Image (spheres, rainbow, N blue to C red):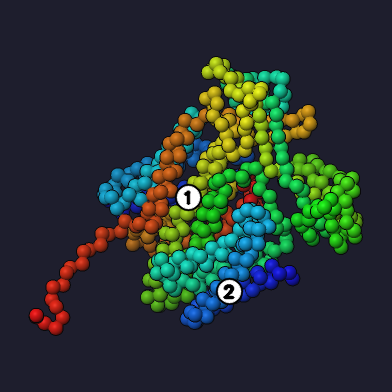
């Protein structure tokens, strides 16, 4: 096991420990472990960046490492700006799960990915950055949704808090998903000559976007609110299909991603 | 129409869009990769969606607080209108030209119906350039029965003229020895070319070559505008991600292929009457979604009533 694998291992263990500590309401200890996990995560992101010579957004390994770090940054935003100080365990769990995947992906592919000419564009960084941010927040909303549906029992206060929390997270992530999709469209028009080519990746990104749009519309009506969480669950399945399923089953202009 | 009823209708339309895109994308992914999703069915669904959004905007009682809502929905309608304009009147043709600095070729694409069009342009490709990153090398274990390969070590580079294969090659290999040992294999099914050599019967070194830059230089003569664009001394330069407008067309560099005296350049010529409308719609849609998220309309905050009663009774 080399240095980077050790860092990945420490990161995901400390993320999981932080999640447990948050649940046990040992917040100070949770912050420390979360910080250690985040520090390890930053080392990985920094190393990937240095090895590539540019922002590490090319391979699935690089993107997942980056998303893990984004969870903590999003948590900081929700904690200090949105004043939602109780979401730490959800972000820590998501970071831990994804970092576990990073651990098993390490070594299965080259660390260095060179950007082909089609990826040498000013739209590349905002497109991928906004998508990673949006999808990471969608994942957090899914975890909160599962707790709301399966582990809230008769605690009405907890249910209300989770309802609001899920809405806050999706409301924050939706504009980034919108911007990412449309920056991609503008970029596609510059490189392939059409805003939308009904590529498999684009189709599933659109399905994802529409599902979360439906969720947000559900929130506006008391009757529709009863089915709102169906779209959070379907939305995350669509995210999974967009990020991973298309690579295995699909083809088209996004085939290299 | 009541707003709540309208919300139900818009939800039904949104769900319909999801289902249509889901079904058609599954057809595209699992059954027929050549299936054309940009069909009249999709146009009908998206047009219905646009109509619903227009109604939604009209039904919503106007207030400046809802600027995000208006921008988002109007932007989406404009995007759909712009795309529909291209669907109706847009033109795009992809052609391949040889690199030949002595000959002009007429730009005469063939439509899907087999009709030959004359775009009233002649083009001379004077030069095509492909640049590559310095190659890296990866060592793989090869299962000789199944042909599957497992990466052992990646991202090896030639340093000071030598490739160090460490435990896999026994000794350093000079660049000259490496180039002599490398063989080239073209997959007859995919057309992809691999450059490799076997260290042992089950361990192979693969050379990874990645293009870093594509460029085409050309001169364009437009009969429609009676003008030459570029010259032999100062040709137009076209690169990926940077299309140019000339002779009434937007020209894209799609591919550079071949080598030596048999090089070819693939260009796309496009006219999109809805491009500006689509771009304006995109800007409004993105701005509207951010405004709605970070400045939700909500209800206006009630002004706090001033309590004039002092604590502890009267003065």
User: At x 88% / y 51%, what residue is drawn?
Assistant: B174
Determine the secondary structure under disc 2: helix
Residue A161 lies, in percent from the top left, at: 39, 71
User: At x 38% / y 71%, what residue is drawn?
Assistant: A160
The answer to whether residue B288 is above or below residue B303 is above
User: At x 58% / y 74%, what residue is drawn?
Assistant: A36
Q: Quadrant of the C terminus of chain B?
A: bottom left
Spatial CA span between label 1 and label 2: 32 Å
Q: Which mark is residue A36?
A: 2
Q: Chain of mark 2?
A: A
Q: How busy is the neighbourhood of tag 1: few (under 14 within 10 Å), some, or many (20 plus)?
A: many
Give the tally of numbered discs. 2
The answer to whether residue B4 is above or below residue B253 is below
Residue A245 visible in image: no
Residue B93 lies, in percent from the top left, at: 59, 29
Q: Quadrant of residue A171?
A: bottom left
Q: Quadrant of residue B199?
A: bottom right
Residue A158 lies, in percent from the top left, at: 40, 75
Residue B17 lies, in percent from the top left, at: 47, 47
Is residue A142 left or right of B149 when viewed as pictured? Answer: left
Determine the secondary structure under disc 1: helix
C-beta proximity under 8 Å, tags 1 and 2: no
The answer to whether residue B45 is above or below residue A241 is above
Q: Nearer the viewer, residue B183 or A76?
A: A76
The answer to whether residue B237 is above or below residue A171 is above
In the current view of this chain or complex, which residue is farthest to the left? B314
The residue that disc 1 covers is A179
In the current view of this chain or complex, which residue is farthest to the bottom? B312
User: At x 75% / y 33%, what residue is drawn?
Assistant: B258
């Amino acid at each position: 096991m080399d240095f980077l694998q050790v860092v990945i291992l420490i990161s995901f263990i400390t993320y999981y420990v932080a999640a447990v500590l948050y649940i046990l309401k040992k917040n100070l200890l949770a912050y420390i472990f979360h910080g250690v996990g985040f520090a390890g995560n930053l080392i990985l992101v920094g190393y990937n960046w240095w090895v590539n010579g540019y922002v590490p957004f090319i391979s699935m390994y690089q993107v997942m490492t980056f998303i893990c770090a984004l969870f903590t940054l999003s948590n900081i935003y929700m904690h200090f700006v949105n004043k939602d100080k109780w979401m730490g365990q959800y972000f820590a769990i998501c970071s831990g799960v994804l970092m576990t995947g990073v651990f098993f992906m390490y070594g299965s592919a080259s660390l260095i990915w060179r950007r082909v000419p089609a990826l040498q564009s000013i739209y590349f960084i905002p497109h991928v950055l906004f998508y990673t941010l949006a999808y990471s927040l969608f994942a957090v909303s899914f975890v909160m949704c599962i707790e709301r549906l399966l582990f809230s029992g008769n605690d009405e206060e907890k249910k209300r808090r989770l309802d609001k929390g899920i809405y806050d997270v999706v409301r924050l992530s939706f504009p980034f998903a919108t911007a990412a999709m449309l920056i991609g469209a503008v970029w596609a028009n510059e490189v392939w000559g059409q805003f939308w080519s009904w590529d498999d990746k684009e189709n599933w990104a659109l399905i994802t976007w529409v599902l979360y749009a439906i969720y947000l519309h559900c929130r506006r009506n008391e009757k529709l609110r009863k089915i709102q969480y169906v779209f959070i669950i379907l939305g995350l399945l669509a995210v999974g299909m967009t990020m991973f399923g298309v690579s295995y089953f699909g083809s088209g202009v996004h085939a290299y991603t | 129409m009541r707003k709540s009823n309208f919300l139900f209708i818009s939800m039904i339309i949104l769900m319909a869009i999801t289902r249509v895109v889901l079904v058609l994308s599954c057809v595209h992914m699992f059954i027929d990769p050549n299936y054309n999703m940009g069909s009249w069915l999709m146009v009908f669904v998206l047009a219905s969606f646009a109509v619903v959004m227009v109604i939604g905007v009209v039904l919503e009682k106007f207030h400046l607080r809802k600027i995000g809502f208006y921008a988002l929905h109007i932007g989406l309608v404009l995007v759909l209108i712009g795309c529909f304009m291209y669907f109706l009147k847009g033109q795009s043709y992809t052609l391949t030209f040889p690199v030949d600095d002595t000959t002009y070729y007429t730009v005469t694409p063939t439509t899907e119906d087999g009709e030959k069009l004359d775009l009233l342009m002649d083009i001379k490709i004077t030069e095509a350039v492909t640049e590559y990153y310095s190659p890296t090398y990866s060592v793989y274990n090869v299962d000789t029965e199944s042909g599957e390969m497992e990466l052992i070590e990646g991202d090896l580079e030639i340093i000071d003229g030598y490739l160090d294969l460490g435990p896999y090659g026994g000794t350093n290999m000079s660049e000259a020895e490496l180039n002599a040992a490398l063989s080239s294999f073209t997959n007859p099914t995919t057309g992809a070319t691999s450059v490799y050599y076997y260290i042992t019967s089950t361990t192979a070194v693969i050379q990874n070559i990645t293009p870093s830059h594509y460029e085409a230089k050309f001169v364009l003569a437009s009969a429609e505008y009676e003008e030459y664009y570029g010259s032999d001394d100062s040709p137009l330069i076209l690169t990926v991600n940077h299309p140019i407008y000339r002779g009434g067309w937007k020209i894209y560099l799609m591919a550079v292929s071949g080598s030596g005296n048999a090089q070819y350049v693939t260009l796309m010529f496009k006219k999109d009457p809805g491009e500006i409308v689509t771009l304006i719609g995109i800007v409004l849609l993105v701005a509207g979604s951010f405004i709605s998220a970070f400045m939700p309309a909500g209800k206006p905050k009630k002004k706090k009533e001033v309590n004039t009663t002092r604590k502890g009774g009267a003065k």
